[in-house]
Amino acid sequence: MKRPYIYIIRCIQISLAVILMAAIPTTANAQVGEHRNDLAIGVNAGYALSNVGFDPKVSQALHGGLTGGISLRYVCEKYFNTICSIYAEMNYASIGWKQDILTLDDQPVVNSNGKQEEYSRTINYIQVPIFAHLAWGRERQGFNFFAQAGPQLGFYLSESTSKNYDTPKSGSDGRSNTVVAQESMPVEKKFDYGIAAGAGMEYSHHSLGHFLLEARYYYGLGNIYGSSKRDYFGKSNFGNIILKATYLFDISKTRSK
């Protein structure tokens, strides 16, 4: 019973560590780094390709869904050539899994109407990633390259299922994938948590703001179903590939010398 709480505490510890890593340079000797006090907020939107790491294994293709929300960035230091900041988002995200339904001969399984069988589960979350954001290149005007990593928390909102067949019995219909329990099981764990990392490019304009393009990967440390010896699945964690565009505008900016 204590295990989920241990992971939650670990995520909080990681979040604090990320914030401290970005904040420590602000207390360093001014001869090493240049202090910044830049705050920017904005919006982001993108597309998430996701699946679920089931054990026992469930054959899947990538599930596609939209994601978007509010972004915030605080730049605290320019340390040598590295621009150090804390970056956070609060997003609505539609993720899930899409099953790859094949026969033992790797041919598509068809339903009673002669159409290929399809199954997908869409699960909607509020996601909150908190990143250490490091950038190299132009700070005020021009392009820079950035990398960021940190913990992400997810809060379940709703789910829906799309399929064009009746749920089969395990091992029926000559399917190569005999695991079907997940097709009728609602999400049991409403809180998701994990680690995300990404890289991208930013264009900054002194009056227009900041335009960011990024590719990101999220690996879930939690499961959507129970994982004890009495449960069906030993593992059921998310994996997400996210392509995203972000626009930020400055609220406060350190004056240039």
Image: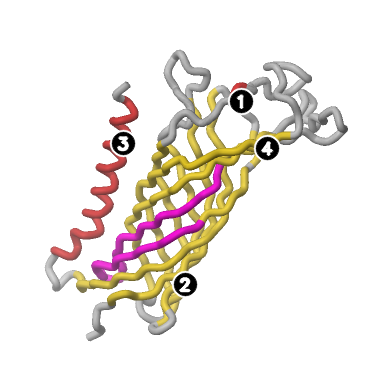
Residue drawn at x 52%, y 18% is 232
Amino acid residing under circle 4: Ser
Q: Residues within 10 Å of mark 1 (few under 14, many from 20)?
A: few
Judge depth for marks 3 and 1 and give the one in front. Answer: 1
Q: Identify the residue at image location x=66%, y=34%.
A: 99
Identify the residue position indicated by label 1 in the image.
Answer: 184
Amino acid bearing label 1: Ser
Q: Is any atom of residue 72 visible in this view?
A: yes
User: Residue 33: image x %, image y %?
Assistant: 20, 70
Q: Classify mark 4: helix, strand or loop.
A: strand
Quarter of the image with the C terminus is bottom left
* Spatial separation of the CA atoms under disc 3 and disc 1: 28 Å
User: Which is nearer the N-term, disc 3 or disc 4?
Assistant: 3
Magenta residues (range): 68-95
* The N terminus lies in quadrant: top left
Label disc, if present, on residue 158 of the rendered structure: none
Mark 2 — residue? 211
Badge 2 marks a residue whose secondary structure is strand
Give amino acid for label 3. Ile
Q: CB atoms at circles 3 and 1 under 8 Å apart?
A: no
Q: Nearer the viewer, mark 2 or mark 1?
A: 1
- For residue 162, the mark is 4
- Determine the CA span between mark 2 and mark 3: 33 Å
Question: In front of the other: label 3 or label 4?
Answer: 4
Instruction: Give the structural element (helix, strand or loop) at label 3.
Output: helix
**Distance from the alpha carbon under mark 4 to that under mark 1:** 11 Å
